[in-house]
Image (tube, rainbow, N blue to C red):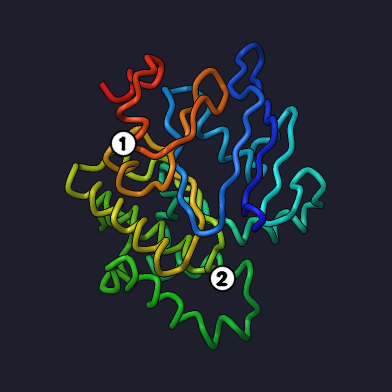
């Protein structure tokens, strides 16, 4: 089966800072891969390259069978609708209610007729999935950090993406809330059979969510293995993340 994301020899530099060096990775259908690396190692740059929010210098990225470097803007926008991106900052619109935030992507990608017929059902279904149906008419400022993260995930889910990219999903959350977000990622993967890449420093989140873990070291895919195997390795470059 063809991977849903196939990255081959990806390179990206910012001036003299070479953050990705011949980085290669394949994401199988229905699996979750976590990327673990030091701050500034290129983890967030990697997932932004996947949806061409950051343009790679060299290398090939194929997403759902499409080489992103060959897509016109309209084709790229259509592909991005199939790839959910959960930003570290949540990126909710403060001036909109929860309902309006969730309806925003529908206005971009659904016809008026479909929105009128299905928007209410879609909004309430994803809010129920994240356990926050009662917040539908609240403003983002009325929500806790964990609740805002869940609403951001609900907005990502509403278009039923085939792939979800999570950028530091538990950053800034207390341990109990972070554990709840990790479990939610697992639940979403099971219900929707999504394929996911999780960028995180949170070892508990990675252990809970990932089928496999990529060690992003010196800009490369230094190692790819299960969390358990990496945790017990004797490799000093990997050990420093777990000790």
Q: Position of residue 172 (x, y in %)?
A: 28, 38
Whether 228 is drawn above or below 219: the answer is below
Residue topped by disc 1: 202
Which image quarter is the C terminus in? top left
Using the image as rendered, state which of residue 132 and residue 228 is in the foreground. Answer: 228
Using the image as rendered, state which of residue 238 and residue 69 is in the foreground. Answer: 238
Count the labels in the image.
2
In terms of image quadrants, where is residue 78?
Answer: bottom right
The answer to whether one can see residue 87 in this image is no
- Which callout, 2 or 1, points to the residue nearer the camera? 1
Extreme residue toward the left, this view: 176
Q: Residue at x 66, y 45 (%)?
A: 6
The answer to whether 134 appears left or right of 79 in the picture is: left
Q: Residue at x 55, y 85 (%)?
A: 116
The answer to whether 71 appears left or right of 133 in the picture is: right
The answer to whether 239 appears left or right of 177 in the picture is: right
Question: How many residues crowd mark 2 within 10 Å: few (<14), some (14–19), many (20+)?
Answer: many
Residue topped by disc 2: 106
- Earlier in the chain: of badge 2 and badge 1, it is 2
């Amino acid at each position: 089966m063809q991977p849903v994301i196939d990255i081959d020899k990806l390179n990206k530099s910012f001036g003299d800072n070479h953050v990705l060096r011949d980085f290669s990775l394949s994401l199988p259908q229905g699996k979750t891969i976590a990327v673990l690396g030091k701050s500034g190692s290129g983890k967030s740059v990697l997932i932004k390259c996947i949806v061409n929010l950051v343009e790679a210098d060299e290398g090939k990225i194929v997403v759902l069978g499409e080489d992103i470097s060959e897509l016109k803007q309209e084709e790229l926008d259509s592909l991005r609708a199939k790839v959910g991106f959960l930003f570290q900052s949540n990126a909710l619109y403060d001036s909109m209610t929860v309902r309006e935030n969730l309806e925003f992507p529908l206005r971009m990608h659904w016809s008026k007729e479909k929105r009128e017929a299905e928007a209410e059902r879609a909004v309430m279904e994803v809010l129920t999935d994240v356990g926050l149906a009662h917040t539908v008419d609240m403003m983002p400022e009325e929500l806790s950090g964990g609740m805002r993260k869940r609403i951001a995930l609900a907005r990502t889910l509403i278009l039923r993406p085939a792939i979800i990219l999570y950028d530091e999903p538990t950053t800034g959350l207390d341990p109990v809330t972070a554990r709840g977000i990790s479990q939610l990622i697992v639940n979403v993967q099971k219900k929707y059979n999504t394929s996911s890449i999780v960028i995180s420093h949170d070892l508990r989140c990675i252990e809970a969510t990932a089928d496999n873990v990529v060690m992003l070291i010196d800009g490369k895919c230094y190692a790819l293995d299960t969390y358990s195997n990496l945790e017990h390795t004797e490799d000093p470059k990997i050990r420093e993340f777990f000790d």
